Amino acid sequence: MKTERNTVIHLHQRAPEVALQSLNRLTGLTFSRWPESLVPLCQQDEPVERESPAAEKLAR
């Protein structure tokens, strides 16, 4: 029985030591604690439409 869920599980909240070890191994850096995002949290009024790189090349 398979159910569909839209759930995000943050590993650093569930298993912080394992997540930190994995992050350090993947990045090659040495974090002493889980880094916080520097990206501000905000809602966008309208979705931003971006052209694909192929469309940019055609425009040139």
Image (cartoon, helix red, strand yellow):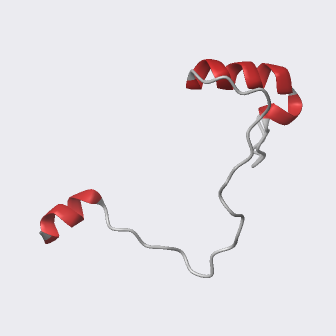
**Residue 30 x, y percent position in the rendering:** 67, 23
**Residue 8 x, y percent position in the rendering:** 76, 44
- The residue at 68%/20% (across/down) is 22
- The residue at 67%/54% (across/down) is 38
- Residue that sits furthest to the right in the current view: 14
- The residue at 67%/26% (across/down) is 23
The quadrant of the picture occupied by the N terminus is top right
- Residue in front for this viewpoint, 29 or 1: 29
Give residue 43's quadrant in the image.
Answer: bottom right
Q: Is residue 22 visible?
A: yes
Q: Is residue 21 left or right of residue 46?
A: right
Give residue 44's quadrant in the image.
Answer: bottom right
Location of residue 57 with respect to 6 vertically, above or below: below
- The residue at 22%/65% (across/down) is 56
Q: Is residue 4 left or right of residue 52?
A: right
Location of residue 37 with respect to 23 vertically, above or below: below
